[in-house]
Amino acid sequence: MSDRVLVVDDDPDFRRFAELAVSRLGYETKSCGSADEALAMLAAETYDAVLVDVFLNNTSGIDLCARIAERWENLPVVVMTAQGTLETAVGAIRAGAYDFVTKPPEPEALRIALERAVSHRKMKDEVMRLRRAVKETVAFEEIVGASAAMKRVFDLIERAADAEASVLITGESGTGKELVAKALHRRSPRSARPFVALSCAAMPEHLLESELFGYVKGAFTDARAARSGLLSQAAGGTLFLDEIGDMSMALQPKLLRALQERMYRPVGANEEVPFDARIITATNRDLERSVEERSFRQDLYFRINVVRIHLPPLRARGNDVLLIAQTLLERYAAVSGRNVKGLTKSAAQRLLSYPWPGNVRELSNCIERAVALTRNEQLTVDDLPDSIRDHQRGQIGVSGADAGPVDLVPLEDIERSYILRVLDAVGGNKTLASKVLGLDRKTLYRKLERYQALGDEAPKSPSDRPPLDGDVKRA
């Protein structure tokens, strides 16, 4: 459908001339001779731009600009003026006009002005649409998403928040596992108490034990005073243990005993002390495989895997990419004081086609960089990092005999896409996925290892059993 332009001029001969000139530029065009007629037509139908003479009977085009801006703030108005003076142009812009051209307009000047105006209208509409979508979909603190996969995650958060059961959050690096943990805490009866987070991959074994359980004075050389551990600091609240799959085998039985008995022994102490904290863990590892390889204790795995929430990779979340990008864009623009409002269509398409191996963390880095470097109101393809700008999907467009253009991809790509979709559908459970796919387990693992090498990591599964996500099982 053609973009629509309304021409407003009280001279019938010039109005016909302007309407013809605009039509020749490819726009659907209507016209009228007064401000009142123009306002009535704008109220009855949708237009993408208005071309108005600066002088009209009983009013001025500048006054009409102000009335249009008041009622339709995203509708651009291009003013035509015979004088072409700076004073007239400034008055039009102050009244809300988007641009101005001299009368009669040169065809090239008219084309450029209308193209810019219509493009501006579409950009403003898209920004508003994304902002509305962001407001409607930010249902869980800072988590943004409207895809079916994320709606399932939101449902699990709601159902698990009130329970005291341990929660295991799985997903690739950068998918937002800590955000889910915080949402669980804030929606739980423990929300008024502390949320304490610790990465099990960030420190050596002896320091991790001291951080978790604390120590008494004289427990080791530098223990000049007693110190409480995170289990104690999270009293009444939530302790989030990130990267639980990286915890050493020597420390795992100590954590297991603490979870079973709700008691722990500070380093160097003779007696155990009780604790009251909900435990939420997260990992980007395949704990099921770690159990098979004897690098993670099966009994600890069962203890932390009472409720499991799997976060899908960003590439499996469809238009969530644009919702998240718009949210990040507004955040970084506000922090940096930059006048950046949205994305061009071509930039949005690049974001959608990129596989995002680093997930939301990588997208955040991309948008922060683009906002810092852009010189435009909209982020363009040139503002994106080279890896995203130059990414090729490897598809070949051809025309089918009885259909429109279709995408042809290598058979291996189709197989990879289908296997990953099946895995995502079953929550990352590789045993169940192998049955659905008709593959033996070793073949499936071999293929997944190859996909991971290509930067297409599979969903992680914490269970060999095929439980329903969110089922609360008391250990």
Image: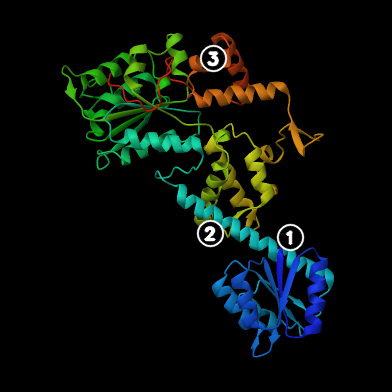
Left or right, residue 290 beside residue 320: left
Q: Nearer the viewer, residue 332 or 6?
A: 6
Rendering colour mode = rainbow
Left or right, residue 206 beside residue 68: left
Quadrant into which the N terminus falls: bottom right
Residue 264 in view (yes/no): no
109 is higher (above) or lower (below) than 326:
below
Amino acid carrying label 1: it is Ser
Mark 1 residue crowding within 10 angstroms, few (<14) / some (14–19) / many (20+): few
Please report whichever mark, 2 or 3, sits nearer to the chain's N-terminal start. Answer: 2
Q: Nearer the viewer, residue 468 or 368?
A: 468
Q: Nearer the viewer, residue 131 or 23?
A: 23
Is the residue under label 3 in contact with that under label 2 (CB below 8 Å)? no
For the image, the number of numbered tags is 3
Residue 2 is labelled as 1
Q: Which residue is pictured at 30% across the width and 19% down the height?
A: 255
Which image quadrant for residue 75?
A: bottom right
Residue at mark 2: 337
Amino acid carrying label 2: it is Gly
- Residue 306, image x and y in percent? 33, 23
